Amino acid sequence: METIVTTPVSFTSNAVNEIKRLMNEDGFDTAQVLRVGVKGGGCSGMTYILGFDAPTEKDSHFEIEGIPCIMEKAHDIYLTGMEVDWAGGLNSRGFTFNNPNASKTCGCGTSFAV
């Protein structure tokens, strides 16, 4: 298991609070950790992944404010320096991604190109 000393991504305090709230819900699978990543698709070419998953041998491990996180090592080039935020309220979009590596993003804020 490889552990990263510096975190490749960051979370705002709103995002940390929401993730911890989700982790404290009844029935949360404590064997899973927070996965940050990308996958092909979306209106700009790639879509962000943010969800709970089981670690694999392809993952790097890091922790943000007590939240265990994983990310496929190959995703570093797309995500290093990205900030994840959470917006609540009537006009919210949920988790948002501010990625300095993206050459363009879409209106929904969950898809990007590099």
Image: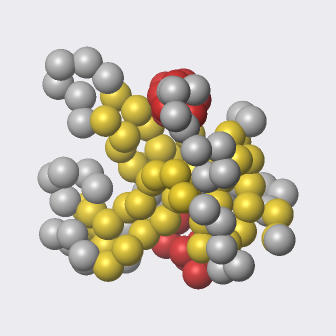
Q: Residue at x 40, y 32 (%)?
A: 86
Q: Position of residue 71 (x, y in %)?
A: 60, 65
Name the residue at 46% across, 52% down.
Answer: 51
The quadrant of the picture occupied by the C terminus is bottom left
Question: Is residue 106 left or right of 74 when viewed as pictured?
Answer: left
Q: How many marks?
A: 0
Q: Residue at x 45, y 53 (%)?
A: 50
- Residue 103 showing in the rendered view: no
Q: Is residue 41 above or below residue 68?
A: below
Residue 14 position, x and y percent, is: 49, 26
Q: Quadrant of the N terminus?
A: bottom right
Q: Residue at x 71, y 68 (%)?
A: 60
Tell me if residue 65 comes above or below residue 40 in the rendering. Answer: above
| Residue at the farthest front position | 27
Is residue 4 placed above or below 85 in the rendered structure? below
Left or right of 109 in this view: 75: right
**Looking at the image, which is closer to me, 70 or 27?**
27
Percent of width and height locating residue 95 = 37, 40
Between 3 and 96, the residue placed more toward the observer is 3
